[in-house]
Structure formats: C-alpha cells, structure tokens
C-alpha cells in the first residue's frame, strides 16, 4: 500500500515538475519575437523593411538596397504623410491620382483578424449605439445586451434590470428576419471613439451572417446572403473612415474576403492571397488608398502580401523566416517529454504532452546514469531498472519526482 502511494506521489510530482520547470526555463530564456516592419512603396513599387534598433532604424528594400530616412519618406508618401505634410513635401498626386490629406486619412486602416484561436469562447455581450444620431457623434447607451438560447436580452447598466419591452422587440425582429438560435458568434467594433456605428454582425445556428444595428431607436436586422457564395468560418468587423466595407471574412476553404458596404446591399471581394490556416496563422492588414499590405504569421515565419486596393489583386509578396526562439531551443535540448498548459491554437489552458528532440533523450540517459550510479547500492535490481527507464523518459522532471519523494522515506514507513 505504502509502495503504491509512493509511486502515485512520484508520478504527481513528476507531472507538476514537467509543467513548472519548462515554464521557468521558457520565462528565463524567452525574448520578444519581432520581425522587421514591412510596407509597400507606392513610388518604388517594392516592399521596404524598417528594422528598428536601439538608437537607429535600418531601412532596406526587398532587393537589399539601403536607404536613409529622408529617402524612404519620399518613396513612401502614404505611410510617411504626416512627416511629409509637416515638411511641406507631400506630393499633390501619386500614380497620376490627386491626393489630399483627408483622402489619405480616410483610406488608412489597420486591423488584426481574430484567427489565432479555433476554440475561442465568443463574447456575446455588447452595446448598441444609435446608428443615425440626430447630432454628430455617438452617445453611449445606458444598457448592454446578451444573446440567450432563444433570443436577446437588454439589461440596464446601472440597475441591472432586464428591459423586457426592448428585449421582446429585438427578439421578435430577429425571428421575423430569419435568424435561427442559438447564435454562434458575433463581431462588432467596441471602440467608443469610432466615428460611426454599424452595430454587429452575427452568425446564427445555420451559419448565416446577419447584420444587426439600431436605427432611429428601432431594430435593423438584415441577412447579408453571403452564405449563397461561401461558408463563413470567421467574421471580423472593421469600420474604415471611408465606409467602404464592413469587415473581413475567413471562409471555410481558408480564403480571405471583404464584405463590402453598398447602398442597401452586401457584396463580397476576395483578396488574391494564398489560403489561411484557421487557428494556426494570425493575420494583420495595413491598408491605404493604393495598396494593402497583409501580414500572415505562423510558426515558420511571416508571409507578406501586397494587393492593389482597387481590385485586391496580388502585386508583390515576400517571406521573413521566424527568428530563432531561444526558449524552444533549450526546451528541445533539455526535455524529451514535458507538459504545456497554454498553446497558440487554443484560448483555453489544459495539459498537453509535448516532445523535444533526440538530444534531450541523450541528456535523459546521462541523468539516469548519474542517478543510478549514485544510488546503485541503495536500490534493488528491479528498482534500478525501473528508475533508469523512468528517468530516460521523463528526464529532469522525473528526477525532481524521485528526489522529492525519496525511496528512503518509503523504506522507513515500511519498517515501522
């Protein structure tokens, strides 16, 4: 019985050590994973890279040519328009198209598409602003809403009482316009400083994408009908100042699409880039009047795609390999098997068994040899064999388990 308890204690201690020790090593050796900032030049028609050092910035293009800051400013007027305006050097036209500061600002947009996690728990709590306020500017609503399995509930932010009338009005409107419950996901721009509001886009139980907002105090619910063209895997809302589109869609076949804003209609435009691996790649978009730069990052590195803002056709691309991650390098050398709680493909923390390289197995053999050599005479033949096999598999974590739950204590209990 005591022997069984010791085996259990050693096992539990080893599992805990296999979580704590790699985590400590990772925190001790980790460095920020940074890439050179890439942006497309409207005049040079190539990708430029900004490598930010401690006291200076190295600027090169895709071909390896080196530039000064002043040269880069003049070749990328959209990205550096603030500096050029201040110096009174902003060109009146680019590629033969007249440009103004207002047009440049309205076309610039930056967005990160929520694609890091497959099993992200959808946050179904939001606020509906009035989309057509009588005065300029949005007014913070005094309630918030959540979806229930059969409808929607509005709750007063101060008293926390359910607004039965408003909840019933919106629930009826959702059902009337064909929304099937429960709601799978929703996406909205929660920025309180946004210039205008378009409410939320919700994916219902059938996978159809609906637009929901409040207009003149009444519910506006409309089916976008995009599922006639594609199956929506993820929608991320974005509200550019020029009102050109509502957001980005990642389809079930991993294509990236734009949901365009029109006069009472919804249309789709596909970005001419390779498929995106759902849950394994993060996506960022830097858009401007002329070109959009799209950054797709995974474990191997960062893919950079440049598309024309008019037809979204690919005009240039490049790839930056992932910088060496010191923590992963050390983990693969020191741990043949360890436990990881957090992983990039999930929002939830739960134990996952990870395996390092064969070099770690050699390290484990050395640990096992040292342990057996030090305790050879204190252990029986079977105990030596079992300990050796255990340490070859578990390494440092198993050694922690054996040292923290020593065999001598086990023998003392048996003798008593």
Image: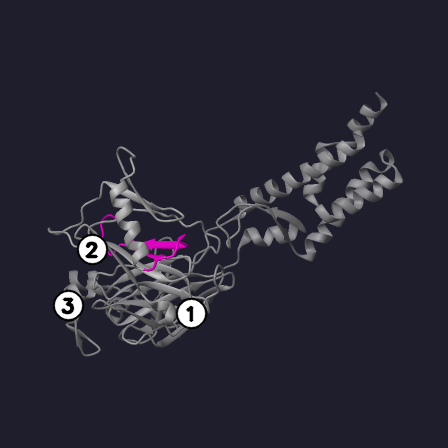
Mark 3, secondary structure of its residue? loop
What residue range appears in magenta?
178-202
Circle 1 sits on which residue?
255
Quadrant in the picture for residue 80:
bottom left
Q: Residue at x 14, y 52 (%)?
A: 133
Q: Position of residue 103 (x, y in %)?
A: 17, 66
Label 2 close to label 3 by CB (< 8 Å): no
Residue 401 versus residue 206: which sits nearer the camera?
Answer: 206
Circle 2 sits on which residue?
196
Q: Residues within 10 Å of mark 3 (few under 14, many from 20)?
A: few
> How far is disc 2 from disc 3 in space, using C-alphas?
22 Å
Left or right relative to 233: residue 45: left
Tell which circle, 2 or 3, labels the residue nearer the N-terminal end.
3
Left or right relative to 191: residue 206: right
How has the structure been colored for display? Answer: one colour
Mark in front: 1 vs 3: 1
Q: Position of residue 175 (x, y in %)?
A: 32, 55
Residue 266 versus residue 94: which sits nearer the camera?
Answer: 266
Q: Residue at x 48, y 59 (%)?
A: 279
Mark 1, secondary structure of its residue? loop
Residue 329 seen in render:
yes
Work out which quarter of the rendered image holds the N terminus and state it.
top right
Q: Residue at x 57, y 53 (%)?
A: 328
**Within the magenta stretch, is there residue 58?**
no
Circle 3 sits on which residue?
100
Total numbered circles: 3
Q: Position of residue 77 (x, y in %)?
A: 23, 68
> How far is disc 1 from disc 3 in space, using C-alphas?
33 Å
**Within the magenta stretch, is there residue 196?**
yes
Q: Residues within 10 Å of mark 1 (few under 14, many from 20)?
A: many
Tell which circle, 1 or 3, labels the residue nearer the N-terminal end.
3
Q: Residue at x 36, y 58 (%)?
A: 112
């Amino acid at each position: 019985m005591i022997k069984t308890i010791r085996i259990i204690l050693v096992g539990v201690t080893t599992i805990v050590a296999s979580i704590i020790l790699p985590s400590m090593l990772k925190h001790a050796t980790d460095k920020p994973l940074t890439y050179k900032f890439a942006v497309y030049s409207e005049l040079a028609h190539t990708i430029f890279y900004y490598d930010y050092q401690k006291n200076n910035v190295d600027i090169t293009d895709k071909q390896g040519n080196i530039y000064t800051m002043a040269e880069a400013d003049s070749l990328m007027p959209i990205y550096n328009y603030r500096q050029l305006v201040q110096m009174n050097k902003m060109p009146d036209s680019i590629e033969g198209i007249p440009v103004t500061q207002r047009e440049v600002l309205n076309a610039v947009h930056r967005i990160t598409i929520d694609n890091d996690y497959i099993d992200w728990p959808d946050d179904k709590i939001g606020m509906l602003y009035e989309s057509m306020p009588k005065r300029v500017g949005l007014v913070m609503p005094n309630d918030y809403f959540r979806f229930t399995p059969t409808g929607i509930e509005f709750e007063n932010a101060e008293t926390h009482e359910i607004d039965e009338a408003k909840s019933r009005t919106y629930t009826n409107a959702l059902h009337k316009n064909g929304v099937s419950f429960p709601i799978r996901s929703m996406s909205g721009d929660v920025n309180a400083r946004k210039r205008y509001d378009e409410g939320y886009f919700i994916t219902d139980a059938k996978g159809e994408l609906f637009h929901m907002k409040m207009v003149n105090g009444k519910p506006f619910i409309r089916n976008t009908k995009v599922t006639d063209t594609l199956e929506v895997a993820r929608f991320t809302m974005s509200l550019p100042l020029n009102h050109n589109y509502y957001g980005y869609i990642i389809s079930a076949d991993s294509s990236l699409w734009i949901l365009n804003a029109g006069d009472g209609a919804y249309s789709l435009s596909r970005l001419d880039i390779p498929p995106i691996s759902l849950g394994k790649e993060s996506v960022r978009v830097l858009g401007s009047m002329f070109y959009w730069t799209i950054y797709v990052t995974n474990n191997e590195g960062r893919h950079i795609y440049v598309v024309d803002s008019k037809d979204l056709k690919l005009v240039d691309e490049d790839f930056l390999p992932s910088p060496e991650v010191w923590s992963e390098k050390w983990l693969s050398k020191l741990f043949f098997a360890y436990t990881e709680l957090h992983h990039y493909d999930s929002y939830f923390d739960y134990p996952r068994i990870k395996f390092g390289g064969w070099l770690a197995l050699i390290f484990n053999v050395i640990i096992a040899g040292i342990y057996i050599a030090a305790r050879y005479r204190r252990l029986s033949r079977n105990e030596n064999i079992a300990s050796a096999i255990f340490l070859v598999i578990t390494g440092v974590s198993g050694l922690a388990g054996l040292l923290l739950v020593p065999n001598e204590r086990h023998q003392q209990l048996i003798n008593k």
